[in-house]
């Protein structure tokens, strides 16, 4: 088994979409065509902050990762935030998630960034087993304010 991790490319759309729909379903989130196309436009625009990586095995896309840089004022540097990470269910337990995380780490190192961060659902214990083996679980608690007016216009 040889896994190649590379940036998304124009011809990846339908394979990427299939995985991203499964990712949204996993998190019980409705993925509309409009949202999917918007994200794809971000991933393929050279000047947008969101970057996409795919894991490819035997010519088939089996995983994805979406990342973006962010400022870290107290540290005086920038980090890389891993927004989405997903591996096709039938391809799990092959090290693909770890390979994607390693690629994200390498990307952050190439850019001279200070940290890679991400969050996951509290009940996503299977993924947390991988995460605990490659990163340090922090003590930070995440909060968010839902802004329905902004969501309606997206």
Image: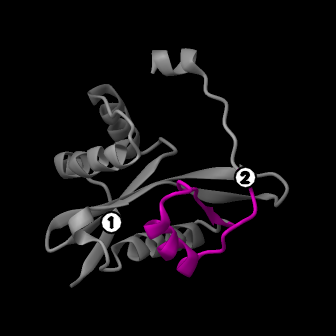
Image x and y of residue 145, in percent: 67, 30
**Image quadrant of residue 78?**
bottom right
Above or below, 34 relative to 61: above
Viewer-closest of 46 and 43: 43
Q: Which of the two discs, 1 and 2, labels the residue nearer the N terminus? A: 1
Above or below, 36 relative to 69: above
Write down the residue under mark 1: 6
CA gap, disc 1 to disc 2? 32 Å
**Image quadrant of residue 53?**
bottom left
Residue sitting at x 66%, y 69%: 137
Q: Residues within 10 Å of mark 1 (few under 14, many from 20)?
A: some
Residue sitting at x 55%, y 71%: 110
**Secondary structure of residue under mark 2:** loop
Image x and y of residue 143, in percent: 70, 41
Q: Give the range drawn in magenta.
A: 114-141
Quadrant for the C terminus, please.
top left
Write down the residue under mark 2: 141
Above or below, 115 relative to 36: below
- Magenta span includes 115: yes
| Side of 2 relative to 74 (left or right) | left
Image x and y of residue 14, in percent: 17, 46
Viewer-closest of 91 and 54: 91
Image x and y of residue 75, in percent: 82, 61
Camera-side mark, 1 or 2:
2
Number of marks? 2
């Amino acid at each position: 088994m040889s896994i190649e991790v590379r940036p998304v490319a124009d011809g990846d759309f339908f394979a990427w979409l299939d995985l991203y729909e499964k990712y949204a379903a996993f998190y019980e989130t409705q993925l509309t065509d409009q949202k999917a196309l918007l994200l794809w436009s971000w991933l393929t625009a050279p000047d947008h902050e969101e970057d996409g990586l795919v894991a490819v095995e035997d010519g088939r896309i089996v995983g994805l990762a979406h990342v973006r840089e962010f400022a870290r004022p107290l540290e005086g540097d920038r980090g890389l935030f891993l927004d989405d990470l997903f591996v096709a269910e039938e391809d799990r337990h092959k090290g693909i998630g770890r390979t994607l995380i390693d690629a994200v780490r390498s990307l952050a190192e190439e850019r001279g960034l200070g940290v890679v961060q991400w969050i996951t659902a509290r009940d996503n214990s299977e993924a947390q087993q991988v995460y605990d083996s490659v990163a340090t679980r922090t003590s930070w608690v995440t909060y968010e304010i839902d802004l329905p007016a902004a969501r309606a216009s997206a």
